Amino acid sequence: MALIAKKIKGTEDILPRDSYKWQFVEKILSDEARVYGFSEIRTPVFEQTKLFQRGVGEGTDVVQKEMYTFETKGGESLTLRPEGTAGAARALLEHGLYNDGLPIKAHYFTTCYRYEKPQAGRQREFHQFGMEVYGASDPIADAELICAAKSIFDRLGLFNIHLEINSIGCPECRKNYHKALKEYFSQYTDTLCGTCLSRLEKNPMRILDCKSPVCKEIAQNAPKITDFLCEDCDNHFKKVQQYLTAADVAFTVNSSIVRGLDYYTNTVFEFISDNIGAQSTVCGGGRYNGLMEELGGQPLASLGFAIGLERLLMVMDAEGIEIPKPETDMLYIAALGDKAQLKAFELVRTVRETGLGAQFDIVGRGLKAQMKYANKIGAKYSIVLGDNEIEEGKAILKNMESGNQTEVSIDDANIFIENLLAADLSDAVSFTE
């Protein structure tokens, strides 16, 4: 019989044999967020479409081509979130979090949805970790946020990643810059790709981010935004660089970094891997001081970054970083007969109450099959229960790796646990704690 359904194109199943890798990475990300003072925020998977039209930008590829938008039975237009920042900003404004004191530091784990061609490191449903700061306009906040991202990569052992930064200035800076870009790219209207031709009038800066080899070559000699920064934006960018240098964070200035979302201003940055080919950006972020006003709030300086978890795991694999597998269940109790099965059920429950892992047969296997299963799941210790063990109130605890054995009491729950702990199970206790 054929399967009635399979996973949707552009989505992936995270199977039990791989989920530990995600849990390992997520734990480090959460720990680092805590160290830097970021609390978690969770927002709905879908929002009103106008949130992303205003927050992300109607002229962006995300809004024009990639969003999953649908109409409710009541006629309301909703969209599956294509990124995490707009929803977090909406929640901050709606709940008045700025009244709790500034700055506000929030981090999130979120699924995002974009309709684009699936490829390595890019899916239609993907996962992001983000860190957001609201209410901090000083360039030292930019530097601290970048340091937080670098600290994550250092903790994960990723050292073949480099930082590139740029400033895209404020709206006033960009007026003259857009004019200069239009003049420059207008010379190549017969060569630019169709997408970039449409960008030429609406947002010529996006041409700098085009992946077409032809457009990339043309863009190499385009005017640089850093030559058009106003005095305030120029000073801000210089101070960010000073702080990063003081923190011993290596970086290069890349004037072609513009980001793909309209809400960015001033500092923008990317952490790029040298090991995964074209989809090499692992982390992207920057400052977006105009976002709150765009969403109907008062001006509030803001900044943040997002890390794609699929791509992060790709980089770790490419660099040969081995993610430690979690400890297996400590104890497997094999039972023969109804009385033994009942006792196994009681003992396993007792063991689990201490925080240790334990399993027993729940599918009706014979003894040989049970022991084979105990080996398969990597149980460290096993006990075989039969009529004799039940009558005597004792059983043999066996180390599955060394074959060493010791006798344990099974009548009294407290004594049974004491026997287990005395049988050199201290490593298991350390793991579960």
Image: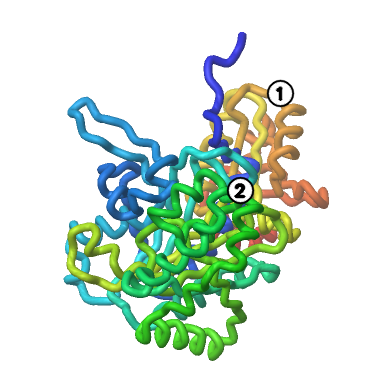
Label 2 packing within 10 angstroms: few (<14), some (14-19), many (20+): many
28 relative to 66, above or below: below
Find residue 366 and name its label.
1
Residue at 60% x, 50% y is 191
Residue at 38% x, 65% y is 264
Residue 149 appears left or right of 396: left
- Splitting the image into 4 quarters, where does residue 135 fall? bottom left
Find residue 310 and name its label.
none
In which quadrant is the N terminus drawn? top right
Residue 7 appears left or right of 177: right
Inspect the image, locate mark 1, and give the three-letter code of the amino acid beneath it: Gly
* Mark found first going from the N terminus, 1 or 2: 2
Instruction: Indicate the secondary structure of the residue bearing disc 1.
Output: loop
Q: Which residue is mark 2?
A: 121
Q: How was the colour assigned to the protein in this rendering?
A: rainbow
Residue 356 appears in the picture as rendered: no
Residue at 43% x, 40% y is 65
